[in-house]
Amino acid sequence: MFITKKHLSRRTVLKGAGAAVSLPLLDAMIPAHTALANTAAAVKPRLGFIYIPHGAIERFWVPQGKGKDFQFSRILKPMEGVRDYVTVVTGLRNKSGERQNPPHGITEQTWLTCQDPQGSTWGPEAGISIDQMAAKQIGQDTPLSSLELCAEPGGATSYRGPNQSLPLEGNPRKVFYSMFGPGDSNTDRVARLKATDSLLDYVLESSRSLNRQLGAADRALVSDYLESVREVEGRVQKLMAKADSLGELPDAPRGTPDDFTELVDVQFEMMLLAFQTGQTRIASLRMIKEASMRTFPTVNVDEAFHPLSHHGEDPDKQEKLARVQTYQIERFARFAKRMTSVKEGDGNMLDNSIILYGSNLGNSDLHNCSQLPELVLGKGGGFKGGQHIAAPKDTPHANLLLTIAQRAGVKVEKFGDATGTFGEA
């Protein structure tokens, strides 16, 4: 560690020509001989919410065994590399999403609200999603109170109140510029940044000046971090160049573009960068929308997702669905491993994060909102990780959301139809 009586502010940024790049947590931000938890630089829990549509085939999702003694199921197997950070919760039900007219009309909307928008009766917070409740309380000390992303347009999962949805941003270039680019508007940012090969060219001199204040370990960390930013920036530019070359695509059902996996991965990178740089503590990503007509040729599934989800207990269709559901969690597992590579104090980013991954449907063929596939990633807020919590059948999904919010420091005692919290988590 770089020992000095002086230390850098946790809010230190690299600046140049109107651009600003926040820094990750450095040793130099921690006063000498002081525990990180006792400093202003202490990392507060981040909250993430990753939504997948159409549930999961139960027998391919539910782990074998309970508590610490469990084995990952077929779909969950990609999470093996971060097992100690995974808490699988089964037995959950969200009654608020069970209105069937139209069948997918409120599926996404009620995942984080646990309140039927037509039956909001539980007070002034009725209809607000748990992420926005958190944004109101713990999101005000960051540049962005929350960040809402998607990899497929349409729909919403975050709500400021009844029917007050927040738009999902599916263009990673816009996300990148909103976090790092100069200018009062996206048009202005694009115009300015086109004058240089990279945003980082603006802050090069600032980084050189900072390096003179840092020890060897911090210099290496800053170098690796800026290279990561540059790599993501390059991927965004290449990805959007491909998208721009496609022109306008029809609204009719279509297959997956070759770069869909790259798009999903880049959106996950946007979330990671937002957390790492302190742009926000609360972010969500809706990977694929409900009733999606996307196909997945990369896993040999050419049938559209939504019709396939109505499998009618057909083993062949269920097998294809399992492939798609495994593909989705593979993208999440990649993100999880990237988070473990980000050093923070004596641990890594997953030690300071609470990420919910799941769906608001169980059996997609029946539009069933029970036996929901849900897992929590991370040990933020004291989550133990490395366990399967087999809750009693039809335990309110709101119990898990309430647990997550309280562990993140949100002052809330009641949420949706919650009957309690998971003390064992």
Image (spheres, grey):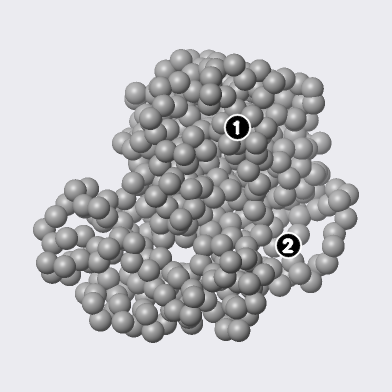
Quadrant location, the C terminus: top left
**Residue depicted at x 58% and y 56%:** 267
Q: Residue at x 88, y 49 (%)?
A: 252
Q: Amino acid at mark 2?
A: Asp
What secondary structure is found at the residue carrying circle 1? loop
Does residue 80 appear left or right of residue 54 in this picture? left
Q: Position of residue 95 (x, y in %)?
A: 62, 18
Could one spot residue 111 in this view of the protein? no
In whole angstroms, how far apart are the C-alphas of marks 1 and 2? Answer: 37 Å
Q: Is residue 59 above or below residue 238?
A: above
Crowding at mark 2 (Cα within 10 Å: few <14, some 14-19, many 20+):
few
Asked if 173 appears above or below 146 in the picture, the reply is below
Give the labeled residue for mark 2.
258
Quadrant of the rendered image containing residue 250: bottom right
Which is more N-terminal, label 2 or label 1? Answer: 1
Percent x, y of residue 190: 64, 73
- Residue at the disc numbered 1: 161
Amino acid tagged 1: Gly
In the rendering, at what x and y percent does residue 333 appear? 50, 49
Residue at 53% x, 19% y: name it: 123
Q: Nearer the viewer, residue 142 or 113?
A: 142
Who's the residue at 76% across and 42% down the image? 292
State the mark number for residue 88: none
Judging from the image, what secondary structure is the residue with disc 2 in?
loop
Q: Is residue 207 visible?
A: yes
- Residue 299 drawn above or below residue 134: below
